[in-house]
Image (spheres, helix red, strand yellow):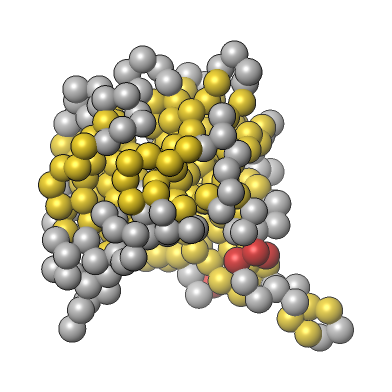
Amino acid sequence: MAIMCAEGSADGANWTAPWVAVPAHFATSAKSLGNPVLTRDRHGRLILIFGWIRSRRVLGVETCRSWQCGRIDASVSLDDGHTWTTPAHLDARAGALPRAQPLSRGDVDLIPVYREGRGASVLATDLDAFGPAGPGDVRIDTIPGRQLMQPALAVASDGTLWAYLRDGRRRSIYVSHYDRARRAWIPAVPTNLENPSSAVEAFLDRRGAIVLIYNPSRSDRRALALARSEDGMRFVRGCDLIAADEAGPVAYPAIAEPTPGHWVVLASAFDKH
């Protein structure tokens, strides 16, 4: 049980053989590792944020049987992922897990997280200050909403901070925005996009519009599509990145911009054969 790391070409077409980032010996007290998120701080250090289930036994009986026992740790690399520091705690709340990339705003890093079965939130911290003892100050802001999780963040061209959320009820992608006057997230509301209880990814295009990568369905994950919004609330369906049944179920999209204006999308897929 380990988290692996690999280097890819700028177009995402070619990858090196993977190597171990979070080794098995770290997980001697863990049942599982998952949801890895990679980012860089303002000094260029590579930071790996991940979730893990901490094994807990009472009278010899394992009492942690799901990700509701999860928590979030992070590790730092100074050599582009070839060696890593010993992981340190980032969010020790029961069931805490990462999903999407952090968003930097000045000297504050916003890390979208959720708690399994307990809703979504955003950690506000300074990843530059993350060291062997862990992060500096961490503020936790909850996003109000029932059965919503796995937020993805985007900042619109007017400065509005938006969060797009997976709907456990299989209805719609939900959205919330941060009210700077109240210093709080407003209650999440549905967008016009369907959601089959699957994670989404968000980013800003070159024209300043918000783009979502999502599964366009309420029932399955057979396709992966783009949708674009000028106001952050209402979206216009774009092209299919992966057509229905082209690659079997596809999920958990992630976006990277290796060169300006050139995006690479990664997603998990299960071969239909």
Instruction: Give the vertical position of 85 relative to 233 (above or below).
Output: below
Instruction: Find residue 236 and report its horizontal and vertical position in percent.
Output: 21, 37
Instruction: Find residue 242 and report its horizontal and vertical position in percent.
Output: 16, 59
Furthest residue toward right: 59
Answer whether residue 89 is visible to the viewer in this image: no
Instruction: Give the vertical position of 109 relative to 207 (above or below).
Output: below
- Horizontally, residue 269 falls left or right of residue 155, namely left
141 or 135, nearer to the observer: 141
Residue ID at (17%, 65%) = 244
Answer whether residue 157 is visible to the viewer in this image: yes
Instruction: Find residue 75 and report its horizontal and vertical position in percent.
Output: 54, 50
- Horizontally, residue 40 falls left or right of residue 247, namely right
If the image is split into quadrants, where does the C terminus sit?
bottom left
Instruction: Find residue 39 and report its horizontal and vertical position in percent.
Output: 41, 42
5 or 85, nearer to the observer: 5
Total number of numbered discs in the rendering: 0
Splitting the image into 4 quarters, where does residue 15 fall? Answer: bottom left
Residue ID at (34%, 59%) = 218
Splitting the image into 4 quarters, where does residue 216 fall? Answer: bottom left
Residue ID at (63%, 18%) = 182
Residue ID at (63%, 34%) = 141
Instruction: Give the vertical position of 175 relative to 172 (above or below).
Output: above
- Horizontally, residue 39 falls left or right of residue 59, namely left
251 or 70, nearer to the observer: 251
Instruction: Give the vertical position of 156 relative to 173 (above or below).
Output: above
